[in-house]
Image (spheres, grey):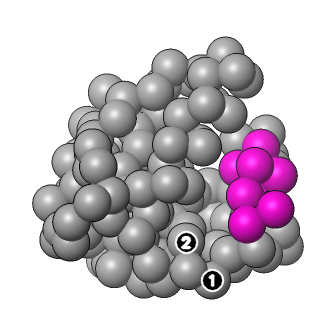
Amino acid sequence: MKIALASDHRGFEFKKRLITQLTQMGHTVKDCGVMTGDESVDYPDFGLKASRAVGSGECERGILVCGTGIGMSLIANKVKGVRAALCHNLYTVEMSRKHNDSNVLCIGADIIEEELLEQKVKLWLETPFEGGRHARRVDKITHAENGKEF
């Protein structure tokens, strides 16, 4: 799977860890920056680049990391075709895939339990979308994003 990654300065160290993890899992990584954690940057610059890679179909999924994950989730969900989920624990990670078919995972580097980072990402990548009644709901999100009624 090709996965777009992006972070701001606060998420840079986590992003480096994720590149290693994803590569070891056999995934291809598109690193959309930031390339150093040395100075403050604006998260929308990097989150938008990765989200557009997912929305366009260039990448199948994306993972975005900033201090709280809130900013990245806000910018990601502005991109057509993106269903970004801000997840804080294993349950929300799993449900974001099973029920919402999330294609972008947003993580808060300042609030995530660091030792669970790899476990959360692995769970998110391996959990399938259940479809069924949930597909109807995801379709409604897509209709709304296209300016259509449902």
Question: What is the quadrant of residue 43 in the picture?
Answer: bottom left
The amino acid sitting under disc 1 is Ile
The amino acid sitting under disc 2 is Ala
Q: Which residues are magenta?
A: 114-122
Question: What numbered label is drawn on residue 111?
Answer: 1
The N terminus: image quadrant: top right
- Magenta part, dominant SS: helix
As drawn, 28 above or below 17:
above
Q: Residue furthest front?
A: 38
Cα separation, mark 1 vs mark 2, equals 6 Å
Q: Residues at badges 1 and 2 in contact (C-beta under 8 Å)?
A: yes
Question: What numbered label is drawn on residue 109?
Answer: 2
Question: What numbered label is drawn on residue 86?
Answer: none
As drawn, 57 above or below 7:
above
Question: What is the quadrant of residue 73 in the picture?
Answer: bottom left
Q: Residues within 10 Å of mark 1 (few under 14, many from 20)?
A: few
Question: What is the quadrant of residue 79 in the picture?
Answer: bottom left
As helix, strand or loop, the secondary structure at mark 1 comes to loop
Q: Is residue 111 left or right of residue 29?
A: right
Q: Is residue 70 left or right of residue 133?
A: left
The location of residue 11, given as percent across then percent down, is 44, 63
